[in-house]
Image (tube, rainbow, N blue to C red):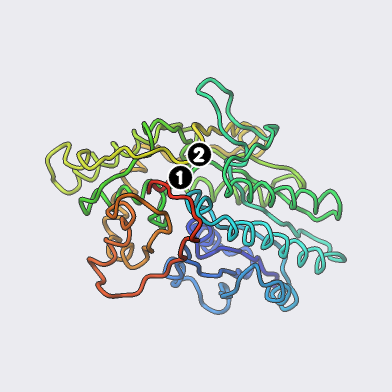
C-alpha cells in the first residue's frame, strides 16, 4: 500500500489536514515532524495507530533522515506543511527560517526526485505556502492572484518565497510533479497561541493585556483551517501539475476589529459586563516592515476546481472562542515563551504567564533570541 508523507503534520494546519484524510484514508499516512515549539503531538495522538497513521520524529534539515523516509516507504504523495511561520520570530532570528523553510524544502525535493525518477503513477508533491510572499497591498490594490509578482517584506516571507521558487524549479528543471498553494491567514482549532486570534482569546479570558501593533488597521483575509484543508485536498487530487493555486477566505478584516470582536465574544461567554475585555487593548509600537494589507483572489480555485469557502467568519470566530475555552488547560500546557522581546513584561510573557498560572514550575521549551535581535513590541500576528 502506498504512503502519503505529511511534513509538519503535528502543526496547526497539518494536524487538521491529517484529520480530514483520516476520515477516509486514501493511503497509509506518515507524519514527519520535528516537534518544535509549535508542534503538538497531542493534536494527533488519537489518530496514530502504527498502521494507517504513523509518526516519525525527525527534522527536515537532517538530509539523511529525509532520505531514509523515502527509502523505507513507497511515498506516493508529499504534502509539505513543515515551516517556521511566525513573522516576529523571523525578525528576531532569521537563520532558523532559512534553515527550515529553504534548506528543509531543498532536502525534501532532492529526496523526492531521487526516489521518484523512475516512478510512474499518481505521485505528487504539494507545497503549502503563504500569501505573504506577494508583499503588501494598498487599500485600493486588487487582491493577490497566481500572476502577482513576488515581493516578500519579512525574513519569514522571503524564506517561503525562496522555497516556492525551489519547488517550481524542481518541476521545470527536473520534471518533479509539483503543486503550490498560497493561502491567506488561517484560524481554527489547535492553532498555536502565538497567533493573533488564539492569543487574544486566551489573554482576554485571563485578563492579560491585548497588544495591538500601531493603529491596528492592518487588514488580513481570514480563512478557516477546515476550508483550507478541503481546498488542499482538491488541489492534490484535481490540480494541474506545475501550477499554483491561491486560497483565500474572501473575508478581509482589520486586526483591531478582530481583537474587539474576540473581546466581545469572550465577555459574552463568561458572563462579563460588556466592554470588560476591550479595556485590555493596548496599542504598541508598529512592527518593523509590517505589511498593511493582504487579500486573496481565489477565482482560479472556484472556476477550475469548484472550491469556495464554507465557513461564515462571524459564526466560526465564536466557535473558535468556544473551542479555546473548552481547551484552555491544554492550551496552557502547549503554550511556549515567545522569543519576541518587549518593553512590557506582561506582553512578553502573555503565553508564559498563562502557562505558569496553571502549571507552575514546569519547564517551557523556547528558542532564546540572539543577542543582536531587534527589539520589537510583542504582538503575535502571522
Residue 309: give its label: 2
Instruction: Please state which of the two labelled residues, at mark 1 or mark 2, is closer to the viewer.
Output: 1
Please report the residue visible at 46 percent of the width from the left and 45 percent of the height from the top.
Answer: 224
Could you tell me if the residues under marks 1 and 2 are in contact, i.e. CB atoms within 8 Å? yes
Q: Nearer the viewer, residue 194 or 112?
A: 194
The x and y percentages for residue 264 are 23, 39
Q: Nearer the viewer, residue 248 or 335?
A: 335
Residue 380 higher or lower than 42, as above or below: above
Name, please, the residue furthest toward the top.
Answer: 140
Residue 180 higher or lower than 55, as above or below: above
Residue 224: give its label: 1
On the picture, is 371 further left or further right than 323?
Answer: right
The x and y percentages for residue 335 are 36, 63
Disc 1 crowd, CA 10 A, few/some/many (<14, 14-19, 20+): many
Q: Secondary structure at mark 2?
A: loop
Please report the residue visible at 48 percent of the width from the left and 70 percent of the height from the top.
Answer: 47
As measured in the structure, the alpha-carbon distance from the residue carrying label 1 to the one carrying label 2 is: 8 Å
Q: Secondary structure at mark 1?
A: strand
Please report the residue visible at 20 percent of the width from the left and 39 percent of the height from the top.
Answer: 279
Q: Quadrant of the N terminus?
A: bottom right
The x and y percentages for residue 341 are 40, 54
Answer with mark 1 or mark 2, whichever residue precedes in sequence. 1
On the picture, is 212 further left or further right than 136?
Answer: left
Amino acid at each position: 500500500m502506498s504512503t502519503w508523507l505529511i511534513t509538519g503534520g503535528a502543526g496547526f494546519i497539518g494536524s487538521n489536514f491529517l484529520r480530514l484524510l483520516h476520515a477516509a484514508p486514501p493511503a497509509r499516512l506518515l507524519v514527519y515532524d520535528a516537534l518544535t515549539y509549535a508542534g503538538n503531538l497531542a493534536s494527533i495522538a488519537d489518530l496514530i495507530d502504527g498502521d494507517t497513521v504513523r509518526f516519525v520524529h525527525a527534522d527536515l534539515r537532517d538530509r539523511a533522515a529525509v532520505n531514509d523516509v523515502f527509502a523505507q516507504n513507497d511515498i506516493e504523495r508529499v504534502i509539505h506543511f513543515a515551516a517556521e511561520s511566525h513573522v516576529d520570530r523571523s525578525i528576531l532570528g532569521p537563520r532558523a527560517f532559512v534553515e527550515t523553510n529553504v534548506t528543509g524544502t531543498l532536502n525534501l525535493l532532492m529526496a523526492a526526485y531521487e526516489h521518484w525518477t523512475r516512478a510512474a503513477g499518481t505521485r505528487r508533491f504539494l507545497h503549502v505556502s503563504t500569501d505573504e510572499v506577494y508583499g503588501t497591498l494598498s487599500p485600493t490594490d486588487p487582491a493577490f492572484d497566481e500572476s502577482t509578482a513576488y515581493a516578500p517584506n519579512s525574513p519569514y516571507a522571503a524564506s517561503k518565497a525562496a522555497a516556492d521558487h525551489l519547488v517550481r524549479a524542481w518541476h521545470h528543471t527536473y520534471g518533479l510533479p509539483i503543486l503550490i498553494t498560497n493561502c491567506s491567514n488561517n484560524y481554527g482549532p489547535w492553532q498555536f497561541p502565538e497567533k493573533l486570534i488564539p492569543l487574544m482569546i486566551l489573554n482576554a479570558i485571563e485578563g492579560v493585556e491585548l497588544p495591538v501593533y500601531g493603529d491596528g488597521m492592518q487588514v488580513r483575509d481570514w480563512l478557516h483551517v477546515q476550508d483550507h484543508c478541503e481546498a488542499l485536498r482538491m488541489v492534490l487530487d484535481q490540480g494541474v501539475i506545475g501550477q499554483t493555486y491561491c486560497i483565500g477566505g474572501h473575508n478581509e478584516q482589520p486586526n483591531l476589529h478582530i481583537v474587539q470582536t474576540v473581546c466581545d465574544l469572550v465577555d459574552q461567554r463568561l458572563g462579563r459586563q460588556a466592554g470588560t475585555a476591550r479595556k485590555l487593548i493596548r496599542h504598541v509600537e508598529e512592527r518593523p516592515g509590517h505589511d498593511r494589507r493582504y487579500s486573496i483572489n481565489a477565482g482560479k480555485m472556484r472556476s477550475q476546481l469548484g472550491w469556495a469557502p464554507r465557513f461564515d467568519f462571524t459564526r466560526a470566530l465564536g466557535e473558535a472562542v468556544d473551542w479555546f475555552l473548552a481547551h484552555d488547560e491544554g492550551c496552557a500546557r502547549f503554550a511556549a515563551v515567545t522569543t519576541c522581546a518587549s518593553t512590557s513584561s506582561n506582553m512578553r510573557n502573555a503565553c508564559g504567564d498563562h502557562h505558569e498560572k496553571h502549571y507552575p514550575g514546569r519547564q517551557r521549551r523556547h528558542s532564546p533570541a540572539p543577542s543582536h535581535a531587534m527589539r520589537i513590541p510583542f504582538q503575535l500576528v502571522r
